[in-house]
Image (cartoon, rainbow, N blue to C red):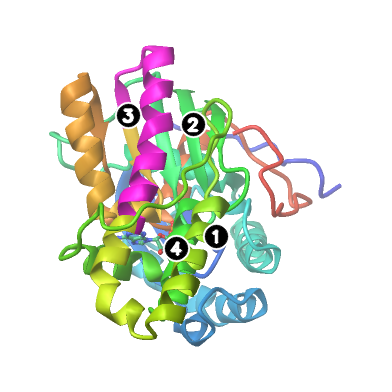
Amino acid sequence: MFQESKRYKINRIMSDILILGIESSCDDTSASVIKNGVLLSNVTAGQAVHERYGGVVPELASRAHQQNIIPVVHEAVSEAGIDKSDLSAVAFTRGPGLLGSLMVGASFAKGFAQALDIPLIDVNHLQAHVLAHFISQGDPDEKKPAFPFLCLLVSGGNSQIILVRSYHDMKIIGQTIDDAAGEAFDKCAKVMGLPYPGGPEVDRLSQTGNPKAFKFSKPQIKEYDYSFSGLKTSFLYLLRDKVKENPAFIQENLADLCASLQDTVVDILMKKLKQAAKDLKINQVALSGGVSANSALRKTLIETGRKSGWDVYIPPFSFTTDNAAMIAMTGYFKYLNNDFCGLGEVPYARINCTL
Ligand code: KG4
């Protein structure tokens, strides 16, 4: 009986639509309230516990979600200035992500929705990253992408080019066949002895480095797909050989190594994006995911957009990294579509579904 999604009588003319979004796919526990598509709150608790391991430890992430979820939801509801009984539905990240982490958010969302007797909405994390571009903060001058558009989604776990035809119709036209772009930054940073997550550190150190100081291998992959494992290996081999000759090589060349790594990642990402925009004749291009904070990627995207006649959309950083506002926003669009789920839906770890 729990497989069935309950039929709710939704009276949209009479009432505001208030969606609670819950995100717990990796190492951020986040909750947000959105009212009629406008953000009221977005509260995120990070997990410092992973720093000493140089990456996210799944078991520790699940435990930290358990500790954080109730206070985070409580804060999101009170910051929104509402009572939980005002909520219209609960949206949660169903996947892809770390299974143990997803289960915490999914179980909480199920219990909460059932206790309030309101609909439950399952959200695909990647679709939510794309729809983050539509989160409104109430400013009438906010610019939103027009359909169809291309979204470059780059984070610690994802590197995709997504063709977005509508809120509910999206297709992954290219994706990494191995590591994600953020993972490449983080893993290369780790071998240079930089703290986790390495992406922001590489970006910061690159500011004074020469991006053409070192050359790393670039992938030859079909169509719009990506690969970053070759870059990681070529980076590792360069360090290994140079450190043999000079043990202080990394310290003496840190800025140049970071700048060259960053330049290579940006070049790989932009090449496929430019090709896709050209082939599909699309001039609306959006950026999503944690790596969109990267200064060189932003600069190159804006410059390329100017040269190619694209309209470029880069949302505020709080909406590009993992956050529940994008889950609530996607939940809002699904609510308008009467697209609810049953209590029997289970999280999925991999991208095994259409967006
Ligand atoms: O979307 P996100 O918060 O969550 C995951 O998918 O894990 O993305 C995190 C990723 C990490 O790999 C981090 O190193 C990277 O985004 N990142 C950056 C920058 N800021 C965050 N990478 C390069 N430059 C940055 N400024």
**Disc nearer the start of the sequence (4/2):** 4
Circle count: 4
Q: Nearer the viewer, residue 76 or 288?
A: 288
Circles 3 and 1 in contact, beta carbons < 8 Å? no
Quickly name the residue at label 2: 162
Give the magenta part as a residue range.
Answer: 261-285
Q: Nearer the viewer, residue 337 or 197?
A: 197
Q: Amino acid at mark 4?
A: Ala
Mark 2 neighbour class, 10 Å CA radius: few under 14, some 14 to 19, many 20 or more: many
Q: Position of residue 30 (x, y in %)?
A: 45, 65
Q: Nearer the viewer, mark 4 or mark 3?
A: 3
Q: Is residue 11 left or right of residue 192?
A: right
Q: How far is mark 3 from mark 2, CA to CA?
A: 10 Å
Q: Is residue 279 above or below residue 341?
A: above
Q: Say if mark 4 contacts mark 2, CB within 8 Å.
A: no
Instruction: Give the SS element for disc 2.
Output: strand
Q: Toward which corner of the image does residue 40 lie, by quadrant?
A: bottom left
